[in-house]
Amino acid sequence: MMLALSRCASYCVFDDRTFILDLGTGRYYCVVGPANEAFLRVVAAERWLLGDEALLEGFVRIGVLVSATKPIRSSPAVITAACSSALDERGESGRWIPSAFLNQMTARASLKLFRLGKIVERIERRRPIVSHHNPAGSEELERSVARACQVVRRLTAAKDQCLTSSIAMLNVLASQRTFPNLVFGIKAAPFEAHCWVQSGTRVLNDTLENIGLYTPIRVV
């Protein structure tokens, strides 16, 4: 039997622990001990040890690992470190506030109606079609939309709804053929999950200080 990481799953490693994000269920898992070592052998496409098959049954049962025809190496999530934040820049937001508000409400409803995996799949699917488009003035657009989304977050009491706000921002920018990344990150102790939007080395809807506390676990 050969196994590989599911398309819905991603991971990052902290010392002797591995954290897994399963978009199919919207859950995070922390793996330690022999099960962690067996999991890391699978994602590194290394030869299994005696007893690994039994240790890996749980991962298969929850859908994190799936059957494969050959070993497939899967690396942890990586993104270029951000060195600036759009929230530190001046920009006009008024024009984009109605669109940001509408997309905030739409994103909130979508997260109630659909699994996170479906929403992320849609984001991934639309990107390759027009990823070669990089409109002139995209940095100014990102700055203005970032400001508008920040205003809407305050007006809608969405301070702690980082996922809703990030999806809303992605949708506004996608309507203008601009496609930054959605980044999921975690803190290990105590465990905490977060997400933000990043374009190259610039984070759009958060501060450098805050995202620096998190390790990326998935980049969309």
Image (cartoon, grey):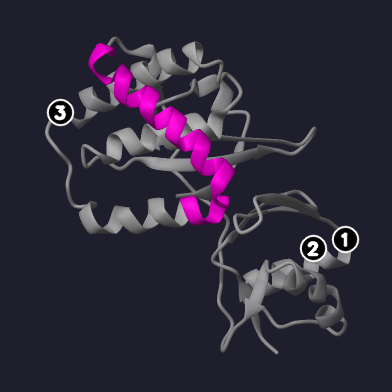
Q: Nearer the viewer, residue 153 or 73?
A: 153
Q: From the viewer's perspective, is 135 left or right of 99?
A: left
Helix, strand or loop: magenta stretch: helix
Q: Nearer the viewer, mark 3 or mark 2?
A: 3
**What residue is shown at x 56% (from left), y 50% (from top)?**
116
Toward which corner of the image does residue 145 lie, by quadrant? top left
Q: Secondary structure at mark 1?
A: helix
Q: Earlier in the sequence, mark 1 or mark 3?
A: 1
Task: Say which residue label 2 marks.
Answer: 36
**What residue is shown at x 74% (from left), y 68% (from top)?**
39
Toward which corner of the image does residue 180 lie, by quadrant? top left
Say whether residue 64 is visible.
Answer: yes
Tell how many labels: 3
Q: Secondary structure at mark 3?
A: loop
Could you tell me the amino acid type at mark 2? Asn
Examine the structure image and report whether residue 133 is included in the region drawn in magenta: no
**What residue is shown at x 35% (from left), y 25% (from top)?**
100
Residue 157 is situated, as x and y percent measured from the top left of the image, at 56, 15
On screen, 5 above or below 125? below
- Asked if the residue at tag 2 contacts the one at tag 1, i.e. Cβ–Cβ closer than 8 Å, the answer is yes
Task: Say which residue label 1 marks.
Answer: 33
Residue 207 is situated, as x and y percent measured from the top left of the image, at 49, 20
- Asked if the residue at tag 3 contacts the one at tag 1, i.e. Cβ–Cβ closer than 8 Å, the answer is no
Could you tell me the amino acid type at mark 3? Gly
Examine the structure image and report whether residue 116 is included in the region drawn in magenta: yes
Residues rendered magenta in the picture: 92-119
User: How far is mark 3 from mark 2, CA to CA?
Assistant: 46 Å
Residue 91 is situated, as x and y percent measured from the top left of the image, at 26, 12
Could you tell me the amino acid type at mark 1? Gly
Numbered circle sitting on residue 137: 3
Residue 126 is situated, as x and y percent measured from the top left of the image, at 31, 54
